[in-house]
Image (tube, rainbow, N blue to C red):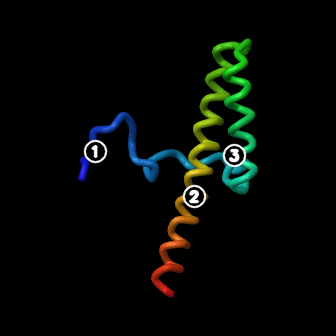
Amino acid sequence: MTDNTNDAGPPAAAEAPLPADIEALSYEEAREQLVGVVSKLEAGGTSLEDSLALWERGEALARRCEEWLEGARKRLAAARKVN
């Protein structure tokens, strides 16, 4: 087992809450928006400020996707225990 206490950032639970517009997204919506953000960043041509804003939104969208996936994992684990 590894100790993650010295990783680059705080654990997800200590992060700021997601913006309300991202919190309300389904997994599919968040993933679709994340793909769009990545495409814009890869295409380049945006200012540094716009790129940073896109990056931050992408990070929030990725967190939302992870929340959905973690919820699905927990539901599957609970269903396995019931059966």
Image height check: is 35 above or below 66? Answer: above
First in sequence: mark 2 vs mark 3 = 3
- Residue that appears at 59% across and 43% down: 62
Q: Give the side of residue 24 with respect to residue 18, left or right.
A: right
At label 3, counting other C-alpha atoms closer than 10 Å, the crowd grade (few under 14, some 14-19, many 20 or more) is some
Q: Which mark is residue 31?
A: 3
Q: Nearer the viewer, residue 20 or 72?
A: 72
Q: Nearer the viewer, residue 18 or 2?
A: 2
Image height check: is 70 above or below 77? Answer: above
For marks 2 and 1, give the one nearer the viewer.
Answer: 2
User: Residue 74: x and y, percent?
Assistant: 51, 69
First in sequence: mark 1 vs mark 3 = 1
At label 2, counting other C-alpha atoms closer than 10 Å, the crowd grade (few under 14, some 14-19, many 20 or more) is few
Q: Give the side of residue 13 with respect to residue 54, left or right.
A: left
At label 1, counting other C-alpha atoms closer than 10 Å, the crowd grade (few under 14, some 14-19, many 20 or more) is few
- Residue that appears at 25% across and 48% down: 2
Q: Which mark is residue 69?
A: 2
Confirm or deny contact between disc 2 and disc 3 (CB under 8 A).
no
Residue at disc 2, secondary structure: helix
| Kind of residue at disc 3 | Arg
| Kind of residue at disc 2 | Leu
Q: Which mark is residue 5?
A: 1
Which corner quadrant of the image does residue 7 belong to? top left
